[in-house]
Amino acid sequence: MSSATFVGMPAFPDAARGATADAQLRHNLRKATGTIRGKRGEVVEELDDWSELREAGRAIKDRTLRHLDRYLETLEESVTAAGGTVHWAADADEARAIVTRLVRATGEREVVKVKSMATQEIELNNALEAEGITAYETDLAELIVQLGEDLPSHFLVPAIHRNRAEIGRIFRERMGAWGVPAPEGLGDDPRELAEAARRHLRQKFLETRVAVSGANFAVADTGSLVVLESEGNGRMCLTLPETLISVVGIEKLVPSWSDLEVFMQLLPRSSTGERMNPYSTVWTGVTPGDGPQEFHLVLLDNGRTDSLADEVGRQALRCIRCSACLNICPVYERTGGHAYGSVYPGPIGAILTPQLQGLQGPVEKALPFASSLCGACYEVCPVAIDIPEVLVHLREKVVDGKRPGPEKAAMAAAEWVLEDPKRLHAAQRAASALRGAVPRRLPGPGAAWTDTRDVPDVPERPFRDWWRDRSRGGRGGEERR
Amino acid sequence: MRIALFVTCVNDTLYPGTGRAVVSLLERLGHEVVFSEEQTCCGQMHYNSGYRRDAQRLAVRFVRTFEDADAVVAPSGSCAAMIRDNYPRLGEHGSRLQRAASELAPRVYDLSELLVDVLGVTDVGAYFPHTVTYHPTCHGLRMLRLGDKPYRLLRNVRGLTLVDLPGAAECCGFGGTFAVKNPDVSAAMGSDKARNAASTGAEVLCAVDNSCLMHIGGTLSRERAGMRVVHLAEILASTEREPALA
Ligand code: SF4
């Protein structure tokens, strides 16, 4: 049973080509993101203090990040005092090794999983599989992705790129190989599909003794971890097994219980468009006779402290993974999540992935450019991450690290012309002299424009010539473009 | 009032009619327009593409050209937003550019802001007997927060019928170098915008930015949609004696 991986995917512009040509995918995405967008809009609109809440969310996260070292120590102390064990993982390799060792120590060969971005980020399932341990995803959408040997394409709805006909087929063909098979004659009615998933998962909940989760928040002063979800499947994993291992990014911290209140309002409204999510599970270490009797917290850095060192880029660490920026993004709506070639898609992925992984390969270097800078993401972000600002900042880093080439030469030439009005004027006159000679389809890089768009007609003369002529009492205003 | 025109490099080179419209409109309203031939470009393309040092050099020139003006009008929402929102954070902390840009930025206006907020006029006495739909553009909508200003100006134009544009708030997909770096996504966004515009049945798509209009208009013309794109300035400058699109 193999899991897919993002490693080795093509860079955004190439990946997007296939996605934009897939009419079914575009239809699925437009419908799904449109629905969540509408719901979010309604529940945000009804609060008259939304902008204050958003500002509070931003400020709490910024304060936490500023003193992250201190809060992390507090968290470690309170989790330990409550009977849990804290592990520190500097990178994905370390985190995978810690979790694998902990599962092995239990003697179990199967784990149930609560939906978690951190474990996706470190590709935990593949690592466990290599050690002969099977991880079962229990979030409905993650289950669809796992059974389909597919990759997630959205934070909240990892299978957003699938419609129900495709889901019915995946269940019929693949469920049996993983456990309780789909019922005879399963169709594609959403209720039927949910029932099939319920029966399939129930067996896992009842039989599996180890669970792996992430967390939406970790409260430093009490050592409590918090998971918000819709289905209750997470609750099952967090309460029934004997051992619970939670992999949590170090930026998930909030200082105190009272800070949590702000995010309990911001997250559900931004994420599912609900006033409150159906299931909120909070656990603090180990409670004798109640829930898992062994609790491990793996605190994951994996590039986060590097991002923290970047004055402009660090705001990305405020992210609470609500996915509002994905749902509003016109680029995401047309490409879907896979084109971003990373676990974190959409606008936030375009600024987070290059920071966590470094601007190393073509995928990371293309991501800061995967945006028209329309600003819709910034406007909806519940913790006010100025995503366009970080995109531009990362573009500067890409450009600085670039060897001389046609683009750099063209930009330098453009600047040289624009820096001096005389040169600009000469260029304008040259363009006007050649105005009749501009072909409808341009060769070379210009084709990227003229493949789908006509070029504008070059005017007889630039504005500045008209102005000069007019101020000398010349032919003035009678000409047209 | 004496108003300095920053025509923008795109309008200067490709859409001089927009610049002429701003001049004739403001003069008709009794104001004086000045144009410094020292001006070139605000540096938006360089800034957005990651060429910060080039953008800084262009910003220095801009600030030097316009720092004595009482009011600067830029008939381009994205250039006005570049200057107002990005100039103050473009220079190094404590630099002369940062100080001068922060001082100048609040006096730089998009045309609709200048008319409604500074000159206090919403009826400019224009005549434009056509059905028009308005695309708000991302910079106008989310950075300058123009809100209903352009709509108020358009509603007061005699002969003009204004119709709603479906999906108005969504980006047209131009995005400067985005249009050539990610041509497939840009084209997909552009053709959705063009389809929405054409579905209104309007004769004219109007906006405050010729860059967006070049992209949407280029798509409409390739798709032979038979719809014109016209800058807001040209509609507001149009009169019965000197009509646009005659
Ligand atoms: S960046 Fe903001 S909007 Fe996007 S997922 Fe994170 S918190 Fe939500």
Image: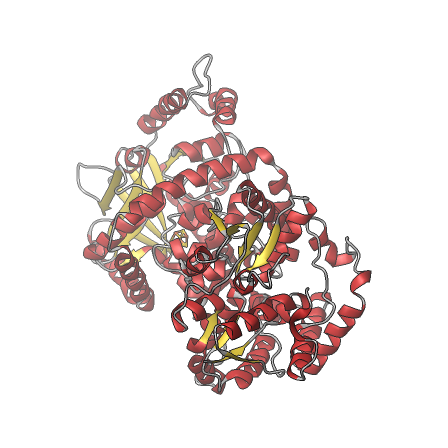
**In the rendered image of this protein, does residue A194 appear above or below residue B128?**
above
Q: Quadrant of residue B94?
A: bottom left
Q: Position of residue A9 (x, y in %)?
A: 61, 47
Colour scheme of this structure image? secondary structure
Q: Is residue A268 above or below residue B32?
A: above
Tell which of A201 and B45 is nearer to you.
Answer: B45
Q: Nearer the viewer, residue A82 or A7?
A: A7
Could you tell me residue A112's position as x and y percent?
37, 34
Look at the image and tell me whether residue B175 can be seen: no
Going by the picture, which residue comes out furthest to the left? A288
Q: Is residue A160 above or below residue A284?
A: above
Q: Residue furthest top?
A: A184
Front one among B202 and A349:
B202
* On screen, residue A231 above or below B46: above
Figure quadrant of the C terminus of chain A: bottom right
Would residue B28 be visible to someone looking at this image? yes
Residue name at image x 65 percent, y 69 percent: B16
Residue A408 falls in which quadrant of the image? bottom right
**Number of disc labels:** 0
Q: Quadrant of residue A418?
A: bottom right
Q: Position of residue A374 (x, y in %)?
A: 50, 57
> How far across and down, in percent of the image, does residue A325 sit?
43, 51
Task: Identify the residue at the far front of this view.
Answer: B241
Q: Looking at this view, is A28 or B103 the one in front?
A: B103
Q: Residue at x 54, y 66 (%)?
A: B76
